[in-house]
Amino acid sequence: MYSRIAGTGSYLPEKIVTNADLEKLIDTTDEWIRSRSGIEQRHMAAPEETTSTMSIEAAKRAMEAAGVTADEIDFIVVGTTTPDLVFPNVATFVQAALGIHDTPALSVETACSGFMYALSIADKYIRLGEAKCALVIGADCLTRIMDWSNRSTCVLFGDGAGAVVLKPSEEPGILTTIISADGQYRDLLYYPFGVSYGFDQLRAGAPAGLTMKGNEVFKVAVNTLSRLVDQTLAKAGLERSDVDWLVPHQANLRIIMAAAKKLALPMEQVVVTVRQQGNTSAASVPLALDCAVRDGRIQRGQTLLLEAFGGGFTWGSALIRY
Ligand code: COA
């Protein structure tokens, strides 16, 4: 038994912030942002929008594409770094908004690789016969946790959500997934305050923003993703030439190009959304997937390699016969 993607959906907030907009806010240039990251613009959630409202929209679109109704969904998992609340978790908000009752609903917090972790978990539930119709979401609202005076980080991130519906299938399907982490790198990319640590300072109004040593993250990301590509292909018994599409995490165009080079894939076979969306964290892979499915590039029967890397560090991949 395999799990198979029955439909995809995504949501991007209406508001667009261009590099030119950021030039007015901080000491930066369009040229610097484009040349270092590839990013030209990003979407920003409106004040009333949250990770869960974006998740709900993406979920509805994925369910419509899959032709499933709310009463068929029996498992909900959301990868996110920026939940609406400390608790209840975002998946329960999605569950309530869609009128679903009495199903598992959980969130995984593995930063930018949250969707890959969520997909891997849902895949196991389907394969074991414990779920028949899983809603898997990656959603983040990272613009909310930026220090908007820190030009090294605030230019890189955006908001959005992406979703897939997974159903059982005798044909593949998700061929394999890998998820992994190495906690020794926590100081290279983190948010400085949480609940059991620093909450009192946050309440007292201490300034806080996502903190990142960009070029050190860059090096570990490129090396890890390069290794991950090999491991994923080996686990599924496939060759580089079997991959039709690379659907990578969209953190930086240069990291994406390094992964494509490792696969010997021309950039025409790589889904790139980072220019228009920036780094949407856990949302970036399902957003890219939905984009290329809806515009007709990704076709049924093709082989896709999805991968992501994020704070922790955490990383994950999936090799999929779409
Ligand atoms: N505009 C203009 N200059 C900027 C700037 C901005 N927005 N942000 C930083 N700079 C400056 C720095 O101050 C530094 O100046 P200095 O040399 O005078 O000190 C210079 O640009 C170079 O900074 P550096 O951080 O070395 O640049 P870089 O080439 O490594 O590119 C990143 C920076 C963040 C784009 C790049 O390292 C990156 O993408 N890293 C990976 C990030 C990532 O993937 N994170 C998410 C993982 S999920």
Image: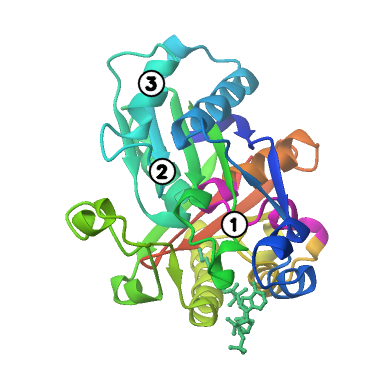
Is residue 6 found left or right of 126 in the rendered image? right
Amino acid type, callout 3: Gln
Between label 3 and label 2, give the one nearer the viewer: 3
In this view, 263 is above or below 169: below
Gap between marks 3 and 2 measured at Cα: 16 Å
Which amino acid, by three-letter code, is at mark 1?
Asn
Secondary structure type for disc 2: helix
Q: Return the disc, 3 or 1, that comes first in the chain's sequence.
A: 3
Residue 269 shown in magenta: yes
Residue 267: quadrant of the picture: bottom right
Q: What secondary structure do most residues of the magenta stretch adopt?
A: helix
The answer to whether one can see residue 272 in this image is: no
Percent position of residue 290, x then y: 66, 38
Which is more N-terminal, label 2 or label 3?
3
- Split into 4 quadrants, where in the image is the C terminus? top right
Position of 183 with respect to 41 (left or right) is left
Quadrant position of residue 321: top right
Asked whether the beta carbons under mark 3 and mark 1 sit within 8 Å of each other, the answer is no
Q: Establish whether ligand 1 lies closer than 8 Å to the Cβ of label 1.
A: yes
Query: In which of the image's four quarters is ligand 1 placed?
Result: bottom right
Q: Residue at label 1?
A: 279
* Residue numbers of the magenta segment: 268-285
Residue at 58%, 50% (x, y): give it: 284
Crowding around mark 2 (Cα neighbors within 10 Å: few <14, some 14 to 19, many 20+) is: many
The spot of residue 246 in percent (x, y) is 67, 57
Alpha-carbon span between mark 1 and mark 2: 18 Å
- In the rendered view, would you say 40 is above or below 98? below
User: Which residue is labeled 3 in the image?
Assistant: 95
Give yes or no for residue 281 being in the magenta stretch.
yes
SS for tag 1?
Answer: loop
Quadrant housing the N terminus: top left
In the picture of the structure, the residue carrying the numbered disc 2 is 118
